[in-house]
Image: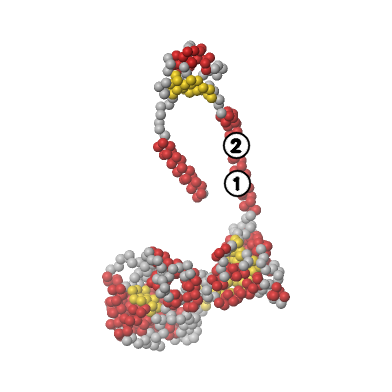
């Protein structure tokens, strides 16, 4: 429909342009006069006619005054005979130049055939269109059960393991798959059976699809890829038919790799529906299980699948002999993030003093896709400012843009709101710098980003998997720093602390109910159950009494009160430092890590230990 509208637009535009051009170059002239034979005879006798051209029964006349006229002669008689019959003198007729033109062949045959052949051609064209549509619908019906898998031809964009930074353990797991596709003989001679199905598990953006492409690039074999959602249709049996076609296509191209992305779309645990066993998704899953069992030991076809929800997959899909090898893709650590940034910086022009290590330090929890987006945003920021290379400033700016959103410098705020924000963020930063075990402050800003009026960026020195109770308590005190600062300085509180209070409350309740880090002892409260209905749903069961619920609420309140008192104590003890931080923020709006450390140095703040 879109192409049809586009064609109509261009056709109309062409006609309009042609009409305008024609109207510009066409000069209107007086049409030739029509004369009867008697009038023509009178003019010939009067010597007014210079030339007569005869074409069939049509006469083209040019008078001596250069005027033109037309006339018709008798069909049965010649021109001279007709004029003599109208009394033209031979002497007058001899002075007129007479020429005879035979009608062209195309005019003769056109006049004969067009009235007959054109309707036949038009009717034939209409029948051809009708049969073509019917044939297309028939072909579509026969191809409805065919798969939509695509064969990737990498060309110059071939990806290998060297193009995938980090994921060392995951790549080691897949080396055997690559080696089997290259040299299966040594495995078969030892009686080894290479895993037929390899399940790539990881959070979104960790590089599952890229790693699958790297396996194909290392093996240099055909790589077929599709999404599991393309197998499911509203008609029962279509998904199973497409599964059969996909696996058959991969077998014909062996050695090959078939990659199924987001396999949880069809691989969810069976028995989820309320009806019988004719659910289309379950039929598709059953066909996948059958196809995985149908591989011979010598078949050189590897099935790679990716998901970020391995907990909802059917157990039959994960048993040995099917997807019996699971490769876990973690979020990159500090060194891996630096390596990923270097890969995505290959096609970027960076200034010589750019330090990607410092960018990696500021991006804990970023996935590979996030880091790629970060590098792209930095290039866009540099181009927006008409720079020839990306600087460290754009790299840091892109980190904050990915985390919090773009700056909102155009947002108009009053001076009083700006002052409240400065003291609020200064309270966060000062409390974080004054507590032992807290992460260092990397940046403090009162520039609005996204939904935040300002922000304090504190990041860990190194990646860690475990956190202690003291670290959690330090975070609680830092959350309460903005709230306590507002109350201390202005004697009132604003809505700016609502997000901090929400995060602090959730963290305090987790300390009590999930981590067992409260006075109630080493015990967890509440039980999460997985209900099988339309997949898996998570529900929380209350496995404690109302008396315990009261104690839990009291323990949460104690943690919040303790965090507030800690923050208040720090801010009262270092009020001058708080005023200095707020003053500089009001002037510069932003404090980087080095500036913040230099600002606190004269106050000789020593971190306290929270118990």
Residue at image x 39%, y 88%?
A: 609
Task: Give me the disc on residue 276.
Answer: none
Q: Is residue 523 left or right of residue 320?
A: left
Depth check, mark 1 against mark 2: the one in front is 2
Under circle 2, the secondary element is helix
> Would you place residue 560 above or below residue 94 in this image?
below
| Residue drawn 60% across the image and 66% down it | 259
Q: Are marks 1 and 2 in contact (CB under 8 Å)?
A: no
- Whether 532 is drawn above or below 18: the answer is below
- Which percent across, then down, holds residue 561? 37, 82
- Number of numbered labels in the structure image: 2
Q: Where is residue 8? Give x, y as percent.
A: 48, 45
Indicate the colouring scheme: secondary structure
Q: Quadrant of residue 359?
A: bottom left
Q: Earlier in the sequence, mark 1 or mark 2?
A: 2
Toward which corner of the image does residue 562 lie, by quadrant?
bottom left
Q: Which mark is residue 133?
A: 1
Mark 1–mark 2 distance (CA, rounded to whole Å): 19 Å
Of residues 312 and 320, the one nearer the viewer is 320
Q: Residues within 10 Å of mark 1 (few under 14, many from 20)?
A: few
Residue 268 visible within the image = no
Give coordinates of residue 521: x percent, y percent: 47, 86
- To which residue does mark 2 refer? 121
Instruction: Please indicate whether residue 479 sits to the left or right of residue 575 in the image.
Output: right
Secondary structure under badge 1? helix
Q: Position of residue 527 (x, y in %)?
A: 52, 78
- The residue drawn where x is 44% and y is 77% is 357
């Amino acid at each position: 429909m879109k192409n049809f509208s586009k064609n109509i637009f261009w056709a109309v535009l062409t006609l309009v342009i042609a009409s305008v051009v024609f109207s510009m170059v066409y000069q209107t002239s007086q049409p030739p006069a029509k004369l009867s034979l008697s009038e023509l005879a009178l003019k010939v006798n009067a010597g007014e006619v210079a030339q007569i051209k005869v074409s069939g029964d049509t006469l083209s006349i040019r008078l001596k005054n250069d005027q033109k006229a037309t006339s018709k002669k008798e069909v049965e008689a010649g021109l001279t005979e007709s004029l003599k019959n109208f009394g033209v003198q031979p002497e007058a007729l001899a002075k007129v130049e007479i020429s005879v033109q035979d009608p062209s062949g195309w005019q003769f045959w056109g006049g004969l055939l067009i009235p007959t052949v054109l309707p036949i051609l038009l009717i034939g064209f209409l029948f051809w269109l009708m049969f073509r549509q019917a044939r297309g619908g028939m072909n579509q019906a026969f191809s409805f059960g065919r798969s939509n898998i695509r064969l990737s031809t990498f060309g110059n964009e071939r990806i290998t393991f060297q193009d995938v930074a980090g994921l060392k353990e995951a790549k080691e797991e897949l080396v055997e798959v690559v080696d089997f596709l290259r040299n299966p003989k040594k495995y078969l001679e030892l009686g080894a059976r290479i895993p037929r199905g390899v399940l790539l598990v990881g959070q979104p953006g960790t590089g599952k699809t890229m790693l699958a492409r790297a396996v194909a690039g290392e093996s240099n074999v055909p790589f077929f890829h599709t999404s599991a959602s393309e197998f499911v249709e509203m008609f029962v049996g279509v998904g199973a038919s497409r599964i059969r076609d996909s696996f058959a296509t991969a077998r014909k191209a062996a050695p090959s790799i078939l990659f199924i992305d987001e396999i949880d779309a069809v691989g969810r645990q069976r028995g989820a529906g309320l009806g019988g066993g004719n659910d289309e998704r379950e039929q598709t899953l059953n066909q996948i299980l059958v196809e995985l069992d149908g591989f011979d030991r010598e078949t050189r076809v590897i099935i790679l699948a990716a998901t970020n929800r391995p907990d909802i997959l059917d157990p039959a899909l994960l048993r040995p002999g099917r997807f019996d090898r699971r490769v876990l893709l973690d979020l990159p650590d500090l060194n891996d993030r630096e390596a990923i940034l270097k890969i995505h910086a290959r096609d970027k022009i960076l200034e010589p003093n750019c330090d990607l290590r410092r960018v990696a330090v500021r991006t804990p929890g970023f996935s590979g896709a996030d880091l790629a987006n970060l590098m792209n945003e930095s290039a866009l920021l540099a181009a927006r400012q008409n720079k020839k290379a990306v600087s460290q400033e754009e790299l840091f700016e892109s980190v904050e843009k990915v985390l919090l959103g773009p700056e909102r410098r155009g947002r108009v705020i009053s001076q009083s709101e700006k002052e409240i924000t400065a003291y609020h963020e200064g309270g966060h930063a000062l409390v974080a710098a004054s507590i032992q075990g807290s992460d260092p402050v990397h940046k403090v800003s009162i520039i609005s980003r996204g939904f935040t009026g300002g922000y304090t960026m504190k990041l860990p020195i190194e990646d860690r998997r475990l956190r202690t109770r003291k670290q959690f308590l330090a975070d609680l005190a830092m959350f309460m720093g903005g709230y306590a600062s507002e109350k201390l300085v202005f004697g009132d509180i604003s809505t700016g602390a609502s997000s901090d209070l929400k995060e602090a409350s959730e963290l305090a309740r987790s300390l009590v109910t999930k981590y067992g880090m409260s006075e109630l002892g080493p015990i967890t409260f509440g039980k999460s159950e997985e209900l099988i209905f339309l997949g898996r749903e998570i529900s929380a069961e209350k496995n404690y009494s109302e008396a315990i619920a009261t104690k839990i609420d009291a323990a949460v309140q104690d943690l919040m009160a303790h965090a507030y008192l800690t923050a208040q104590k720090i801010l009262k003890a270092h009020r001058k430092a708080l005023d200095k931080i707020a003053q500089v923020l009001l002037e510069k709006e932003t404090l980087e890590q080095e500036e913040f450390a230099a600002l606190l140095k004269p106050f000789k703040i020593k971190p306290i230990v929270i118990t």
